[in-house]
Image: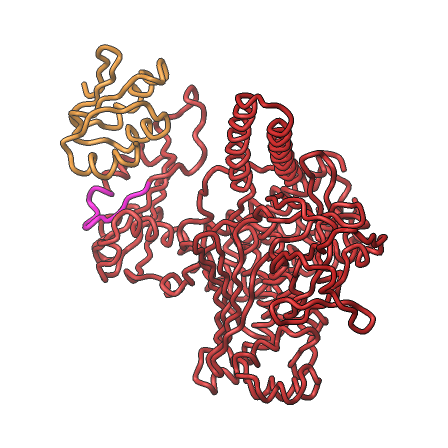
Chain colours: A orange, B red
Amino acid sequence: MSVRLEAEVVHLEGDCGVEDAEPLLVLLQADRFRTVDLDRVDRLHTAVFQVLFALRPPLQGQSPDLFVRERLLPILS
Amino acid sequence: MDDLLHHFIVEAKELIQQASDDLLALERRPFDPHRLDSAFRAVHTLKGSVGLFDLKPLGDLLHAAEDLLAAARADGLDLDAAALGALFACLEASERWVGAVEANGDLPPDAPEKADALAAGVRSLLDTPNPSLAAVASRADAAWADALFDALRGSDPAAAASGRPLTAIRYEPRPDCFFSGDDPLGLMRSVPELAALKVSARDPWPPAGSFDPFACNLVIEALSGAPHPDVAAVFRFVPDQVRFLVRDAEPAPAVASAPSGAQGPDSGPPAGPRTVRVEAGRIDRLADLVGELIVAKNALAHLVDAAGRVGEDVDWTGKLAAHHAVIDRLAGDLHAAVVDVRMLPLRDIFRRFPRTVREIGARLGKTVGLTVSGEDIEADKTVIDALSEPLVHVLRNAIDHGVEPGEVRLEAGKSPEATITLRASRFGNRLSIEVSDDGRGIDPARIRRVAAERAVVAPDRLAAMSDDDILDLVFTPGFSTSGSVTDLSGRGVGMDAVRAAVESLGGRVSVLSRPGHGTTVKMDLPTSVVMTQIMSVEAGGRVHGVLMDSIIETAAIRRDRIAPVGSGRAFVLRNRTVPLVHLSALLDGPERDSLAQDVKVLVVRVGSEPVGVAVDRFIDRMDVMMRPMTGILAGAPGLIGTTIQGDGSVLMVLDIAELIG
């Protein structure tokens, strides 16, 4: 499971594929201000990225993946 | 004028200015998407506002301009010289008409006709298929790549300036691409030597509740340092959704050679500091209030005097004096604060000049660029307002008389495009403005010849004058050396008007020239209006103010030392005969013979000669905030302004030199 809610923080972990987009969306639709933690994300599928890009929840954490950290996160911040 | 219309006029002027700025930028750098958007928005907003009023011709005109800009924006229609010319014509007419609405409350009678003609001109550009459309599409297309490149230069100048070509990528994944197993960002991850990545939404996002996570609504743009084939290989399965553009690392030369005063190519209009629009009348009112506070301060000074004379209560006097000191400080601070509020950046007038120069150049068939610097320097509103017209005149002169026709410039080994430099700088509380051209300069011999022909100066004096003094003759009233009178400069408003305007602000203007290399007109001005020092005197039972600046000295002359000379009188002061007039006589008032032994005399300078002006009494010297004469008194000879005295009475301030002259 790559999308997990823990203490009102949504954790994205490992390879987040296209199938993670909908669960993430549902969690954020329930509360737009839930923080999303990206500390352990390796890959972000475009569909997951798009949910974050459109809904702009607060983010925390730095992915270990260079592409996610240096190319994608700046776009989301 | 009703409030709504008033606001409309203010807004309209700003929007027209904005659109003009944008079009000028587009002329220098076509297909700048920010500028195109900004021009479109300005015209679109203005058209919307016009709809609130009964100004149909203006609305029609703006509608046509808007259509043309929309076509340029959406379809990549080329904004060539003809299109820009038509748009400028629309803006000029709009500006004129807004001015007419402001002055008369309505459009000029010929507006409907003119609007039809101008709008038809614009529409003809839209209807005829643009011959260069195909070629242009690729250029218009390049706008997105320009924006990417500019962004990269901002974020990673080293990569941008590496000197290697860059491949720009624009990838618009199909909305259903997730269903075919595509991961567009995954592809971007595979792009070799990715230098920049930008993601945007293709369509506005729907509300979160109706968001479809399986429809891709992204546009991805990127730059890569890798060769085009290597980049294209990554996208081999989605060739229909991606476009490439290879460009040199150092793009469009227009960017490199853009005049320093022009705005950065990628910035669009800069986000300046927050400003508050204050109606000038309110500021003036504030200034008046401060003037009155100063009057209150002066009244207190009177009280201090009175108390000292009448009573022996020293403590009371001391208290009053302390009060006075406080008010004095307050008044000073308040005055400084108000002067500060009245300070405006030179940009307020400078920003219109690029268009002015373009228009004048176009009318005279000369290509002229304007470089502006120092537009952030501030000066008092009075100074700013009064500078606009003289500067336009100097610019006009530079283009008309200074700049040679293109052929002549080429022969002289110069670039066919002339450059005019408008440079402002500040030294303490003095403002210096220079207008330089790189034209033919002023030939002193020619000035001498013309001055002799027109008998501007006596021949013997002319021969004795140095070349520098000769150049100064261009400021002589009525002097014009133009071979032919053009519709621009030959209006009888000469450089003498420029000098008069600058000197009325307490400034100086001079001209420098290097024949063959150009002319510089330099203005030196105060940045703010200052307190004026005057002396109050009594004559014929009335009190008047006289500018301290004009007084050389005051003297008491014994009656028996005054001798009749011709029809007048004179006295000898330090071995020099000085003519004497009585101030009352100058003011056509009764001249009372005082019985006093001594006659009190102000020695003032008239031209270069001292003249004695007899008065009944010297009263005081003071700093005042002088108000210029207005209304029917504005043209009254010999009166400079008024100020209010400590006792509340109005004091007329006299220009003695003018009264005598």
Indicate yes or no whether the magenta region holds residue B426: no
Residue B274 left/right relative to B559: left
Furthest-left residue in this view: A64
Q: Is residue B223 above or below residue B417?
A: above
**Residue at 24% from the left image edge and 15% from the top image edge:** A9
Q: In this view, does B421 lie above or below B346?
A: below
Asked where in the image residue B473 lies, by quadrant, the reply is bottom right
Residue B287 left/right relative to B178: right
**Residue at 61% from the left image edge and 53% from the top image edge:** B548
| Whole-percent x, y for residue B598 in the image | 71, 55
User: In the picture, which quadrant includes the N terminus of chain B?
Assistant: top right
Residue B107, can we see it? yes
Residue B188 left/right relative to B553: left
Q: Nearer the viewer, residue B357 or B601?
A: B601
Asked where in the image residue B549 lies, by quadrant, the reply is bottom right
- Residue range (magenta): B188-198
Residue B60, can we see it? no
| Whole-percent x, y for residue B94 in the image | 68, 52
**Residue at 47% from the left image edge and 48% from the top image edge:** B269
| Whole-percent x, y for residue B142 in the image | 40, 56
User: In the picture, which quadrant includes the C terminus of chain B?
Assistant: bottom right
Tally of numbered tags? 0
Asked where in the image residue B608 lies, by quadrant, the reply is bottom right
| Whole-percent x, y for residue B519 in the image | 51, 75
